[in-house]
Image (cartoon, grey):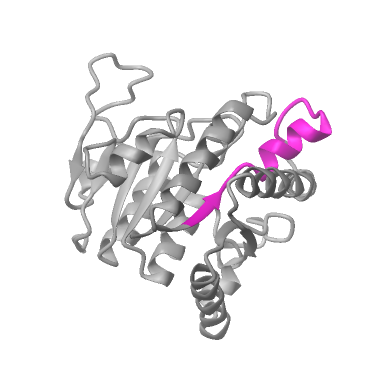
Amino acid sequence: MKTVIKVGTSTLAHVGGHLNIRRVELLCKILSDLKNAGHQLVLVTSGAIGMGVGKLGLPGRPKDMPGKQAAAAVGQCELMYVYDKLFSEYNHTVAQLLLTADDIKDPRRSGHVHDTLERLLDFGAMPIINENDAVATDEIGIETTIGENDTLSAIVARLIGADRLILLSDIDGLYTADPRKDPAATLIPVVEEITEEITALAGGSGSCLGSGGMATKLRAAGIAMEAGIEMYIANGERPELLYDLFDGKPVGTRFTGKKVRV
């Protein structure tokens, strides 16, 4: 199985931005075990800005663009240091790719990204991908930025022809209502198409350190489903759920790899 796994800031870091050591160590251990079982994995990681906030001792996520970029530059170093250290303990090699929208939209550059990813997988390395937040800004316009890593992970999954995409978030999956506010909300186990009713269930960003929310996850689902790729939303607070998911057990919300209705 060729699988793209996206991990959000809320999974990697505590509320203050500092690394959630126990959870990240468990995540890397499980991913290493899945690689040992023969799966090809690509990790799309958030957390650079959040970890930069913690590393710099800032009171919160900067609101100005240069501040966000500076925090991302610091946090990206921290992220890759942690990933390299933890995966090396299980004899796995990681590789860093920092992408911008131009790398995806330009056919020539996109082809180079595809070829690099495929060769890294052939070599047995684990590509770790993030948007190049230190240079990409949403102030310049949507044409120059991907925006957030839910969308990026779906684009990467489509680019390499992944079998499935897994989004690890701070919620169990897609609910009929916001479970943080409505105790009667129930989990939707399977979504076969992105309808107006499904889209209406999306709320705002869940984490104060992250930039994604259910709306971005549904956008990612649309990209994946249109490409025939199954997508899952699962709770990143329990990385061990990945074992169940890879064993074919029901986990979180599964978006079937069918075309969305236009």
Which residue reaches farthest right?
Answer: 56
- 131 left or right, relative to 1: right
Residue occupying image coordinates x 46% and y 64%: 156
Residue occupying image coordinates x 53% and y 78%: 110
Number of marks: 0
Region of the chain picked out in magenta, as a range: 42-61
Q: Quick check: can you spot residue 159?
A: yes
Q: Quick check: can you spot residue 10?
A: no
37 vs 147, nearest the viewer:
37
Quarter the N terminus occupies: bottom left
Give the quadrant of residue 92: bottom right
Q: Is residue 72 above or below residue 171?
A: below
Residue 3 pos. (x, y %) = 39, 57
Instruction: Determine if the magenta segment contains residue 47.
Output: yes
Residue occupying image coordinates x 70% and y 29%: 18
Residue 29 pos. (x, y %) = 52, 40
Residue 183 pos. (x, y %) = 28, 13
Give the quadrant of residue 143: bottom right
Instruction: Determine if the magenta segment contains residue 104.
Output: no
221 vs 147, nearest the viewer:
221
Residue occupying image coordinates x 59% and y 73%: 102
Residue 91 pos. (x, y %) = 60, 52
204 vs 192, nearest the viewer:
192
Q: Is residue 131 above or below residue 209?
A: below
Give the quadrant of residue 179: top left
- 245 left or right, relative to 34: left
